[in-house]
Image: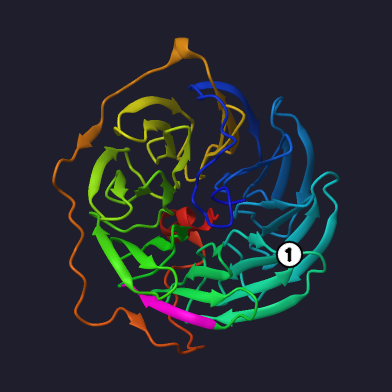
Amino acid sequence: MFRANPEHTGVYDNGGIEPGNTELWRFATGDLVVSSPTVANGVVYVGSEDKNLYAIDAVTGKEKWRFAAGDRVTPSPAVVNGIVYVGSEDKNLYAIDAVTGKEKWRFATGGWVYSSAAVANGIVYVGSVNNSLYAIDAVTGKEKWRFATGDYVDSSPAVANGIVYVGSGDKNLYAIDAVTGKEKWRFATGNWVYSSPAVANGIVYVGSGDKNLYAIDALTGKERWRFTAGDRVISSPAVANGIIFFGSRDKNLYAIDAQTGKEKWRFAAGNYEGSDPAVANGIVYVGSEDKNLYAIDAMTGKEKWRFVTGGWVYSSPALANGIVYVGNEDKNLYAIGANSSSLTTVPTTIQVTDAGSPAPLATAATTAPVQRTTRQSPLQYAPVGAVVLIFGIAVWKRH
C-alpha cells in the first residue's frame, strides 16, 4: 500500500537487487500519473487523471485490465487479500477484484478522495475533503465509524498498535482509536498537515506547512523534537535504520537522526515538492519537479544515479524485485532497472557536521485536549484551474 505498509515507513523489504537507471518499459495512460504505484503478486496498480485505475504486468509492462472511475484517480492503491482499494475525485472509495478488475463495492464519502487508503485488521481507513476520516469494513464496504476534523483530510492515515494517525488541513495531527473511532489525542502544528505520518519505534513523524518535521510520542501526543526546514513540508517521511528522510519545498531532501532530530545530510533535488522518498537496501529513491528520479546513498547522502523522465515527478516510487516504479506528469508509468554501464553520478549533497539542531520545545503545551469539532474551515486551495495544479497536485497524489 502507500508508503509500503500500514505504518507508512516507506521501506520496501522486497526491493531486491539494487536497481540502476535503465528504463525497462513505460506504460502510457491518458493523463497525468500523480498516483503512487503499488506492486503486488507481479502486478503494478496505479491511478491516472484519465479517470482509470490500471493493472499492469510488473515485468512486461502490458496492461492486464483497467477500471473506470467517475473522475480522476490520484491516490495510491492498497492491495490486500486480492482486493484493490482506491479513492477518486468522484467521492467514492472503490474495492476492486485484483485479478479481474471487477468492482466488488463502492463507498460514497462526502467529498473528493485524495487520501490513500490504509488497510489493517479487516478495516479500510481513508480520508476525504469533507473533513472526515472513515473506517470501512474491508469485505462488505459498510461504514464502521467516521471521525470529523476541522478541515480537509488529504493526508493518508497510518495505522500502528491499534491507533490511526492522520493529518488535517485544520493544522492538527490526530490519534484515533482504530476500533472505536474515538480521539485519543491531537497535536497542533502551525499550518496544514497534508504530509502523511510515519510511525516507528513509538514515535510519529509528520511534516507541516509551517516548515517543520515533528517527532511526536505515539501514545501521549507529546512533542519529542522538531526540525525546521527552509520551506513547507508536504512530503511524507520515510523511516529506516534510525534515520528520517523527507523533502521540503526548499528543494532539499533531508536525512535526520530519528532520536535527536539532528540533521545528518541534505541533498539538493532540484525543484522538490511532493514525491515521497522510498528506501530499499540502503538507498533512498525520490522524484523531483526537475524531471529526475534520484537514487541517493542513505548513509552518506551521495547521489548514486538519476533517471531523467519527461515531466515533473510527483508520484512516489515503489520498489519490487530490483525494479523502481514511478508515475510522471508526462502521463507515463516508468519501470526502471539495473544496468551499471549507464549509471550517472552528480555530487549535489551538502554534508552536515553540527548543524540542523532541533528547535526548542514551546513552553506552552502543543497537544490540545480532546475536543471534537465540525467547524467548516475556509477553503485552503481552489478546486480548479492553475491553483490546483501548482499547490494541490503534490498533495493529491496520495496519494
Query: Per the image, is 187 magenta?
Result: yes
Image height check: is 320 above or below 216?
above
Q: Residues within 10 Å of mark 1 (few under 14, many from 20)?
A: few
* Image quarter of residue 100: top right
The magenta segment:
183-189
User: Residue 111, position in %: x, y?
Assistant: 62, 73
- Along the line of sight, the residue nearer the viewer: 348 or 165: 165
Q: Amino acid at mark 1?
A: Gly
Residue extending furthest left? Answer: 354
Q: How many marks?
A: 1
* Image quarter of residue 43: top right
Residue bearing mark 1: 122
User: Residue 126, position in %: x, y?
Assistant: 62, 66
Image height check: is 107 above or below 88?
below
Query: Per the image, is 348 magenta?
Result: no
Dot 1 falls on a residue whose secondary structure is loop
User: Residue 296, position in %: x, y?
Assistant: 37, 32
Which residue is at a point 79% across and 47% down the rendered structure image? 98
User: Residue 360, position in %: x, y?
Assistant: 18, 67
